[in-house]
Image: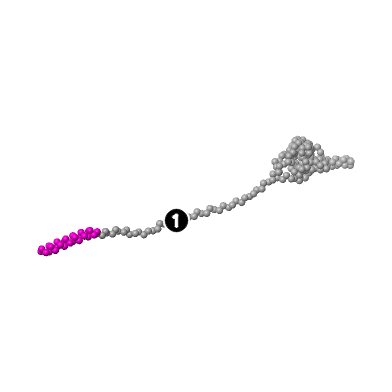
Amino acid sequence: MTLRYTSGASVVTLLTCGLIYVAPAQAQNADLLPPGESAVITVTGCLQRGGSKGKEYVLANPRLGPVANVSDGACDAAVDAHALDLDDARDHGINESLVGHWIEVSGRLEKETSTNPENLRELGVRSFRLVPVVPPQRVVTVPVPRSEPPAPPEPAPAPALAPTVAPTAIEQPLPKTASPLAMLGLLSAAGSLGVRFFRSRARG
């Protein structure tokens, strides 16, 4: 009786430990591909050293799909249970100079058969490329000069008045004086009248 309870408790304990142990392995890379499936995919991640004695290349912080560019080419992502072990990496040109940089890898992601989280899921490399680095553009704010309100137009100068000219008296033409010949005629006429007057007096 005691042995039966002890055996039952041991089985429960083993199952519980097994579930706790297996759960992390089942969660590995589930966002890339379910553990029971294998397919050719493209992933982007940070190339790091890892694997057996740190001599292999692994892809840390893998993300599904290609990435157009990154703002900073350098990376220092930690190698954890979600990293991918890159198989045949050297055969396709991956080398030490790329460690610590973001790369895009296309290849076959193998099924996850191991329950040990230290055994990384393998990605058979078929091609890769260094992800282009495009630094964020600095937005330069150019101060806009304040526009001053236009100055009011200057008043037009008043038209110059013509100088007032006092009316001048119209000069009347002076009478022409009698010419000497006319005077001589008058004197002759007066003399003849005087002669006639004296003659008439003498006869009377």
Q: Residue at x 18, y 60 (%)?
A: 189
Q: Is residue 200 left or right of residue 81?
A: left
From this viewpoint, is residue 195 visible? yes
Q: Nearer the viewer, residue 109 or 92?
A: 92
Q: Nearer the viewer, residue 146 or 203?
A: 203
Q: Position of residue 145 (x, y in %)?
A: 59, 52
Q: Is residue 190 left or right of residue 87?
A: left
Q: Quadrant of residue 51?
A: top right
Q: Residue at x 82, y 41 (%)?
A: 52
Q: Quadrant of residue 36?
A: top right
From this viewpoint, is residue 5 visible? no
Q: Main secondary structure of the magenta part?
A: helix
Q: Which residues are magenta?
A: 179-204
Is residue 32 rendered magenta in the image? no
Q: Quadrant of residue 90?
A: top right
Q: Is residue 202 left or right of residue 93?
A: left
Name the amino acid type tagged 1: Ala
Q: Residue at x 35, y 59 (%)?
A: 167
Q: Position of residue 39 (x, y in %)?
A: 75, 35
Q: Nearer the viewer, residue 168 or 12?
A: 168
Q: Position of residue 20 (x, y in %)?
A: 81, 42
Q: Which residue is mark 1?
A: 158
